[in-house]
Image (cartoon, rainbow, N blue to C red):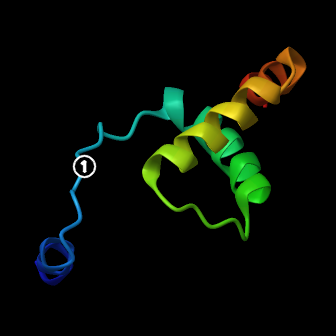
Amino acid sequence: MVAQQAVCNCEFVQLNHPAYSPDLAASKYFLIRNLKYRLLGTWFIDDESLKIAVNAWSESQKRQFYFHGINS
C-alpha cells in the first residue's frame, strides 16, 4: 500500500502486467539483460527518446542474437 501511494504521489502511471508465464520469462531475461547493458548510463529527455533507443537497439541485433536467446 505504501508503494502504491508513492507511485500516485509521484504522478507515475502504474501499468498492469500479465501473470508470470514460464514461456515468456527466459526470453524476457535474455533481452532485458542485454538491453540494460547497452543503455547503461544513458539518460533520456523523454519517453519518445527512450522508445527510439530501444527500437534502434532491437533492430540492430542480428537474427542469430534472437535465436540464441530463444534457445538458451
Q: Is residue 28 left or right of residue 12?
A: right
Counting from the top left corner in percent of width and height, residue 54 is at 63, 40
Residue toward you, 49 or 23? 49
Q: Can you say whether 66 is above or below 47 in the image?
A: above
Q: Could you tell me which quadrant the C terminus lies in?
A: top right
Q: Is residue 50 left or right of residue 56?
A: left
Q: Which residue is pictured at 81% across the width and 18% down the height?
A: 67
Q: Can you say whether 34 is above or below 7 in the image?
A: above
Q: Is residue 55 left or right of residue 62?
A: left
Mark 1 lies on residue: 15
Q: Which residue is pictured at 14% across the width and 79% down the height?
A: 9
Counting from the top left corner in percent of width and height, residue 71 is at 78, 23
Q: Which residue is pictured at 21% across the width and 56% down the height?
A: 14
Q: Can you say whether 66 is above or below 50 in the image?
A: above
Counting from the top left corner in percent of width and height, residue 36 is at 69, 56
Q: Which residue is pictured at 49% across the width and 33% down the height?
A: 22
User: Crowding near pointer 1: few (<14 within 10 Å), some, many (20+)?
Assistant: few
Residue toward you, 45 or 3? 45
The kind of residue tagged 1 is Leu
How many numbered discs sit on the rendered protein? Answer: 1
Q: Is residue 17 left or right of residue 29?
A: left
Q: Quadrant of residue 7?
A: bottom left
Q: Could you tell me which quadrant the N terminus lies in?
A: bottom left
Q: Quadrant of residue 40?
A: bottom right
At mark 1, the secondary structure is: loop
Counting from the top left corner in percent of width and height, residue 39 is at 72, 57
Residue toward you, 21 or 46? 46
Residue toward you, 47 or 12? 47
